[in-house]
Image (spheres, helix red, strand yellow):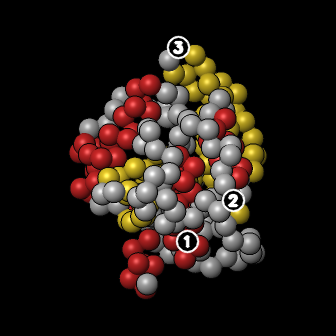
Amino acid sequence: MVNDDRDFSAVPEDFTNVAGARDGADDELTVRIARAGDAPALLEIYAPYVLETTVTFEEEVPTGRDFCSRISYTLEKYPYLVAESAGRIVGYAYAGEYKGRAAYDWSVEATVYVAQGCEGRVVGGALYKELERYLRLQNVVNLTACITAENEGSIAFHRHCGYEMVGIFAHLGFKFDRWLDVAWMQKSLLSPEVAPAEFQPFPTILSDE
């Protein structure tokens, strides 16, 4: 489930998907690959979304061990990235399977979370730029984003990043004693071909860089 509930509707053109942008203060934003040891910091970002919002449909905050396992599991096949500013992690993004069938190898679901109090449009843009760079190297063709339909800021941000709305599932999730609609958005990262290049797991492209 994606991602941040702040207002992304006015994303400046030069900040959209720009790694190395500034976070709204004087500190430069850097993006790197996540490590298992980042789990506590990422969990600190994620927990308020679980407990206080409908951005994610998860209802219980994962343990540190569970979150560490999620990072390691994702990195076996896809990028998992963190953004840092002034030595502090201020956001993270990762890709995951759209579906488990082999025919879906060239399609992924993108997810991004930004720490509360940070400039979401800048952090999210920097993370997505680097995420997309890696996914192109993996020969991924389609990006999808699953967003709670009432999260208008995230939908606006994804539109600005090149995603298009492809459908809304009505009353698909139930959280905080109410039904919630879910929007699906999609972006073509590479031009679809009849026979796409073979999907490359994330560790494979790292060894080639």
Identity of the residue furthest to the top in this view: 177
Picture coordinates of residue 128 (x, y %)?
A: 55, 59
Callout 2 crowding tier (Cα within 10 Å): few <14, some 14–19, many ≥20? few
Amino acid type shown at disc 1: Arg
Q: What element carries label 2?
A: loop
Identity of the residue furthest to the front in this view: 26
Callout 3 crowding tier (Cα within 10 Å): few <14, some 14–19, many ≥20? few
Q: Name the residue under label 1.
A: 133
Res 13 label: 2
Picture coordinates of residue 156 (x, y %)?
A: 69, 43
Q: What element carries label 1?
A: helix
- Decide if residue 73 is in sight here: no
Amino acid type shown at disc 3: Asp
Identity of the residue furthest to the bottom in this view: 208
Tell me the mark number nearer the camera, choosing from 1 and 2.
2
Q: Distance between the residues labelled 1 and 2?
A: 18 Å
Amino acid type shown at disc 2: Glu
Q: Which residue is drawn at 43% across and 50% down?
A: 91
Q: How far apart are marks 2 and 3 (CA)?
A: 38 Å
Q: Which residue is drawn at 32% across and 42% down?
A: 43
Q: Mark 3 points at which residue?
A: 177
Picture coordinates of residue 119 (x, y %)?
A: 51, 46
Q: In this view, does 178 lie above or below 17?
A: above
Picture coordinates of residue 190 (x, y %)?
A: 69, 71
Tell me the mark number nearer the camera, choosing from 2 and 3.
2
Q: In this view, does 138 lie above or below 36?
A: below
